[in-house]
Amino acid sequence: MRVTPAGLGVPAVSFTVSGLDPFAIADGLARRSVESRAGCHCASLAHRDLQLDPPASCRLSFAVYTSPAEVASALAALRAVVRELR
């Protein structure tokens, strides 16, 4: 994993969870009031190269005004969604 120094990157995290549909993850997050997006995010060739099925990922985006508590809440919701879907 490559970490970008603060201020030099885009505050977005695209991810997959092995064996789970990214669209189902995004759906579960939405039910918990966490906004996310699932899809190819203009990276369909990368998704295909990674042999993702479906060729998609889920994405969480943050901003300078996102508090650490909001990040923790989003991660807790993601953990709950993964437990629910497994």
Image (cartoon, rainbow, N blue to C red):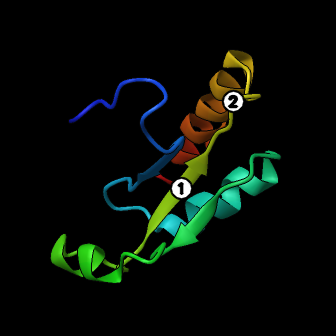
Residue 32 placed where, x, y %?
79, 45
Question: In the rendered image of this protein, does residue 39 appear above or below residue 79?
Answer: below
Residue that sits furthest to the top in the current view = 68
Residue 43 shown left or right of residue 66 in the figure: left
Residue 16 placed where, x, y %?
38, 56
Q: Count numbered badges in the picture.
A: 2
Q: Which residue is mark 1?
A: 59
Residue 82 placed where, x, y %?
51, 46
* Image quarter in which the N terminus is found: top left
- Mark number for residue 64? 2
Circle 1: element type = strand
Circle 2: element type = loop
Q: Residues within 10 Å of mark 2 (few under 14, many from 20)?
A: few
Res 52 visible = no
Question: In the rendered image of this protein, does residue 56 appear above or below residue 18?
Answer: below
Q: Residues within 10 Å of mark 1 (few under 14, many from 20)?
A: many
The answer to which of 43 and 50 lies nearer the viewer is 43
Residue 50 placed where, x, y %?
19, 70
Amino acid marked by disc 2:
Val
Q: Residue at the spot x=37%, y=75% of the render?
A: 43
The answer to which of 75 and 14 lies nearer the viewer is 14
Residue 72: image quadrant is: top right
